Image (cartoon, rainbow, N blue to C red):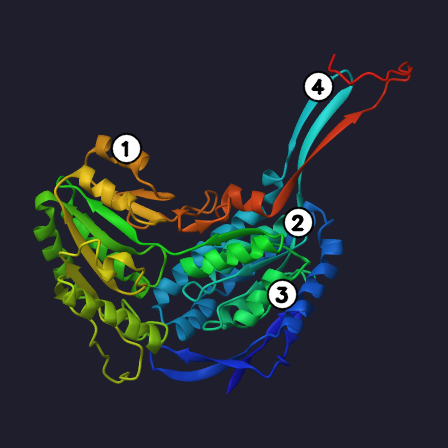
Amino acid sequence: MKTISHWIGGKPVEGVSGNFGPVYNPATGAQEKQVAFASADEVDAAVRAAREAFKAWGSSSLAKRTSVLFKYRELLDAHREEIAQLITAEHGKVHSDALGEVARGLEIVELACGIPEKLKGELSTQVSTRVDVAAIRQSLGVVAGITPFNFPAMVPMWMFPLAIACGNTFVLKPSEKVPSAAFKLAELAAEAGLPDGVLNVVNGDKVAVDAILEHPDIAAVSFVGSTPIARYIHTTGTANGKRVQALGGAKNHMLVLPDADLDLAADSAINAAYGSAGERCMAISVVVAVGETADPLIGKIKERADKLRIGPGDDPASEMGPLITKVHRDKVASYVTGAAAQGADVVIDGSGYTVEGYEDGHWMGVSLLDHVTPEMDAYRDEIFGPVLSVVRVETYDEAIALMNNSPWGNGTAIFTRDGGAARRFQMEVEAGMVGVNVPIPVPVGYHSFGGWKDSLFGDHHIYGNDGVHFYTRGKVVTTRWPDPSDGGINLGFPSHH
């Protein structure tokens, strides 16, 4: 059985802890690989490699960094099919979705290629007689990223390309469920000319996570995952003196007003709720239907959902693949049966779905719940699967109150033809990312990604300008070069003149 090892100091390093985790093919349910779990000592080895590499990389020129990043972008583009295949094999998402993930990750590599523009700094001349003030940004040192299973290539690329462009060195701990894509990203970075130790990958479980959070030589930690773990990462990391950005979970609402294009809204609900089998923090999991909108909208959603093709991710005919593990599949299915017991109408029940020839896969069909109320578990919890709930309200004001009462504030969307209503919504809704007739408002690379409330712990969103600021710290330099005619002693408090 193939073993996925670590990448430390510019080369593969076999695990020595003796602990391994299984890596499954979700479509078959079979374990096809295993991944080495790092001990605290192995994490320390990666940090030491990064710390040593920082001595040269941290002081390297912007020209050198960008030359490596441009080459890296070229190699990623050339290998995007291979990376997508690795994602599909371990995550289960369909190939087109995996390709889209790689493309969105490449956006941040392209942003990193333009880092000289982001690090230009500021200069004020003659603030006082022959005194100039410059504001510059400098790298932090060794930084780390802990990434989730649902985007094994994209989320790491949201982190390390920008971090190393800013002059830091990086230790990446990918999800142990999907380790191969991150390993491939490190291999390609080395091929692009990234010096040994600038990017390191250590696989593992909570032992590795805690070793990262407690290591005195790691200056900052980025995280994407569930809200309980995000809160733990932020609390533990900051207690150990680290800068932390921890992106948590979500319960994203899509508000549909009576004047909306219901065909567009139905298409969007299908795409946003069931794409990637609902395993994404930007998935729409609740449709809030105003007034008489609900019945026709549910009819259109059901009509489309019944035609979705579910199957192995490497089958070109498949539109949705399996869930990541059997345990997760069973948990998602329990929300459908639980919603029925709590009074919801189950319009579509996907809990018993199987695929012929792949009966042991982690399958879950699409599910659609109507008459869901805020007291139900299906509404309150982040399900992270292909389950869409419909909540009926009478007015816009009732809808906005419902949405803003959610503990999460990641992403949201409104569907309407009324520009005034859309503008009011984008100002009033308590969420970090808003879509107007756009169901999954993930910002492009040069704007930052992040939510509000329990969807984000820390002060910085990820990538974009916030990402640059997170991976650097400001310094202000005040300079005076005295004129040869200056002189004398003055013990008074310096004043501007």
Q: Residue furthest top?
A: 497
Check disc 1 and report the residue beneath it: 423
Label 1: state its secondary structure.
Answer: helix
The image quarter in which residue 131 lies: top right
Q: Position of residue 397 (x, y in %)?
A: 19, 37
**Residue 200: mark in rendering:** 3
Residue found 23% across the figure and 79% down from its top:
354
Mark 1: few/some/many CA within 10 Å (<14, 14-19, 20+): few
Label 2: state its secondary structure.
Answer: loop
Q: Earlier in the sequence, mark 2 or mark 1?
A: 2
Q: Is residue 40 left or right of residue 328?
A: right
Q: Earlier in the sequence, mark 4 or mark 2?
A: 4
Label 4: state its secondary structure.
Answer: strand
**Residue 165 higher or lower than 280, as above or below:** above
Q: What amino acid is labelled 2 in the image?
A: Leu
Q: What's the distance in space between the residues labelled 4 and 3, CA to CA?
A: 44 Å
